[in-house]
Structures are given as structure tokens and as C-alpha cells.
Amino acid sequence: MERLNRKSAPQAKTYTEKVIQFGEGNFLRAFVEWIIWKTNQKTAFNGSVVVVQPIEKGMVSWLNEQEGLYHLNLQGLQNGEPVNSLDLIDVISRGLNPYEDFAAYLALAEQPEIRFVISNTTEAGIAFDPACKLEDKPASSYPGKLTQLLYHRWKHYNGARDKGLIVFPCELIFENGKQLKACIRQYIDLWKLEPEFGAWFEEACGVYSTLVDRIVPGYPRDTAAELCDRAGYEDRLLDKAEIFHLWVIEAPKEVAAEFPADQAGLHVLFVPSEAPYHERKVTLLNGPHTVLSPVGYLSGLNTVKECCEDPEIGVFVKKVMYDELLPTLNLPEEELLQFAGDVVERFRNPFVKHFVTSIMLNSFPKFRTRDLPGLKTYLERRGALPQGIVLGLAAICTYYKGGKRGQDEIVPNDAPRIMDLLKKLWATSDVAQVARGVLADEFIWGEDLNAVPGLTDLLCKDLALIQEKGMRETVKSILSL
């Protein structure tokens, strides 16, 4: 079987280098590169990506061995039908390691067609390191490297306003653009760069917050040989992702005109604010995940797909999502219903085994950020507590009791202080003390939740019912109301 490269795959196209990308990992290749590939097919964008290795140890050498080519396997449900596609992605032109060739890295700033910078350097990547110097080759931090690049471009083009860059960070941080921009401003100040450069950065460049959403398992070890046979090439950079994708970019329409991914039939949105979309994802995807996992596990189920397809737990999941969480959001109902439907299809993805035990790591802080806001809003708007969400909290408390589920040992994992609290409370064998003690702990919640009207009593009732009749019977009791 031939190794994949542009000689063995002459069908691969060549485009103009328009994008610098910091990061060569599976997510960016399955998300950003795929979106650019689709945009090239459907619009006149005609752009390719130069990948910059953001840390000293990386894999751009593998990219260059295959001349930027790789296959992407998308799997999932689309309109209820299974999808299992395999496509050759040809939009990476080359990879650069700035630790080995800093001059080549800075030379990117001199290319007139370069217009965009995209990154995913992990949540820790957008950080200011005061040890970085302008003279470093390169600066160790990603914002430091980007400031070096921008400064070189400003000098090379004598501050030309039409040579600014548009930056889309894809790190999983709320308001990632604002955080990245603040770091760049810190380097401008630390390195005492010219005020004129600072003005050019503010006026000619744009750093825009984005929200990205696609599950990317990465290299498909279990099916790699089969996929290589299907493609007809030996491909060391095979990538795998779900079919669903969403990219929300907080940028004006003139930016969309230059990066027309929203015109390519893709779920790419240019919006005034990413905040409601961030809230929608956290509430309708992460929120149900957090409560379905302990409820499903204690009902004898192991994966998200099993939970959604179970005749009782599946109804519970939809009750939480559609009846309790969806009405707390402030986007058009049609848009919310579409997103919720997409989430259900993702949960039921037949190609992904998403074990609920992996979701239950640090369940209490997850519930605080993902479900508690919805609980409070629901109570405010409906004058009653959302029974499914409260039952989810009771299930978390019960899971943290430990013990066994059949032959399986229950092994909760959270901050030691939380684990110690639950152990102490369950040692009393008094569900009322468990309910009051958990809700009172300000380390978990930042407040005493016993003050929420009716919450202590309902949580106590659910805990008692779970102890008496088991999780599945407790779920059935709220679904019959």
C-alpha cells in the first residue's frame, strides 16, 4: 500500500496560503481543516493552512512527511440515518516548527495573502508568561509567539492598515478572544513596543472569541487498518470525529465576508455575542450529561447511548432537557429545539461508546456550573423546582456514597474535601443530614443552597426513595406525574 503524499494522491488540490494555525492536533484537523476544506468546495475562498507547532515537541514532521494530507472519518447520526464517511483533506500546505526554524516562522508574517490566525493550544495555552522576551526564538507562550509574529508583520509592512490579521482562538475557554487579546496587550507593555504598533494591533487586527463543538476521538486505532484499506493509502494521520459540528464566532459580518464558512452549508455562525450559545451548549449538552450519568449508572446502564435508548431513563433525559433546561434559555425556541434534537442524536451515536463513569468525574462542580443555574431559573419562572434536575443531584449524592452496583465497585472521584464530606454525611445513615449537609457546603456551591425554597425537602425525599426502592423506581415515580 502506498504512503499518502501529494505524488501518490494527485487528486489533492493546492490552494493559496491564507491561514496560520497554531496546533497540529486531532481536533483542529477534524474541525477547522474540515471546515476550510468544505468552504473551498462551496465558495471562492481557495485557502490553505500553514500549521505552526506551538510547543517544542510535536508532530509537524509527520504532517510534512504526508505533505499535509490525511483522511477524516466522520461517524454519527444525521437526520436519524447513520453516517460513516471518509474524505481526503488537502488544505494543509505545510508544517513549521519555530523551535527549529524561527526565521521561517517570522517569514510567514511577510506573506501578503496571509489573513487569518487560528489556534487550539489547550486551555492552558492562552496564558501570559512574563519570562518571555521579544528576542526569544521563539517565545515559549502562544500569545508571546503571536505577538512576535504580529510585530514583525507591522514592521515589514510599515504599519499598513490592510495587512492586519484576523484571529480566531478555538481553545475551550469562555471569551477566549478577549483573554488572548489581553495577553497580547501585556506583551506589548512588557516588551515596551512602539505605541504605533499598539494602535495598529487595536485598529487593523481583530481577535474574536469563538465557541467550538465537535467530539473528536482522534486516531481510530481499532479501525485504522480497515480505513487505510478503504482509502487505498497508508495514512499515519487518520482522524475521526462525530458528524455534528458547530463554530460560533463573535465577529461582525465583514469578517464573515472574508471567511465565508457560513455560506458553505456549514453550522458556522457569526454573531454579536457568543455568550448565549455558550450557555446553550453548557445547559443542553453538558447539563443533561451531568444528571443522566449517575441516574443511568445506578439504573444499571453504562453508556450515554444506552441511557437515551432505555424506555424509562431515555424519557427522564428528555424531561430534563426539553421540559426543565430548555425553557430557561433566552434564544429563539425553534433554534433551541433544533440544537436539542442534534444533542439527542449525538447522545445516540452508534459509533461512540461514551461511558457514563467518565462523565461522573468531579460531578459536584459540574452540577454547579451546568445544572444549578437552570434549576434556579426554572424555579424563578415556574414557581416550582425541576424534579428531574433535583433527582440528578440526589443521584450524584447517592453515587458518592460508594459501595457496589451488582458486582461493580462504585468509585466516585472528586476533590478530597468533597469526598470527605460525603463520607462523613453518609456515615450518619440519615438522608436528611445528607441533604442538608451537601446543600450547606459553600466550598461546593459558593453559597448555602438550603436557602433555595423547597430544595432541601425535595432532595431529602429523593434520597430516601432511592435508598428504599432503588434508582429506576424513583425515576418512574417522577415520570408518572
Image: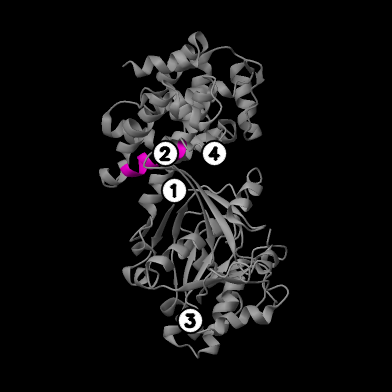
Q: Nearer the viewer, mark 4 or mark 3?
A: 4
The earlier-in-sequence mark between 4 and 3 is 3
Asked if the magenta segment contains residue 104, the reply would be: no
Image depth: mark 2 or mark 3 in front: 2
Mark 4 lies on residue: 352
Q: Secondary structure at mark 4?
A: loop
Residue carrying label 1 = 244
Q: Position of residue 426 (x, y in %)?
A: 59, 17
The residue segment tinted magenta is 338-347
Q: Residue at x 58, y 78 (%)?
A: 149
Q: Residue at x 41, y 37 (%)?
A: 344
Q: Is residue 101 above or below residue 377?
A: below
The residue under label 3 is 113
Task: Point out residue 253 in the picture as x, y percentages from the top left corner.
Answer: 32, 68
Task: Specify few, some or many for label 4: CA neighbours under 10 Å numbering under 14, 14-19, or 20 or more.
Answer: some
Mark 2 or mark 3, which has the lower sequence index? Answer: 3
Quarter of the rendering containing residue 363? top right
Q: CA distance from mark 4 to mark 3?
A: 40 Å
SS for callout 1 = loop
User: Earlier along the polypeptide chain: callout 2 or callout 1?
Assistant: 1
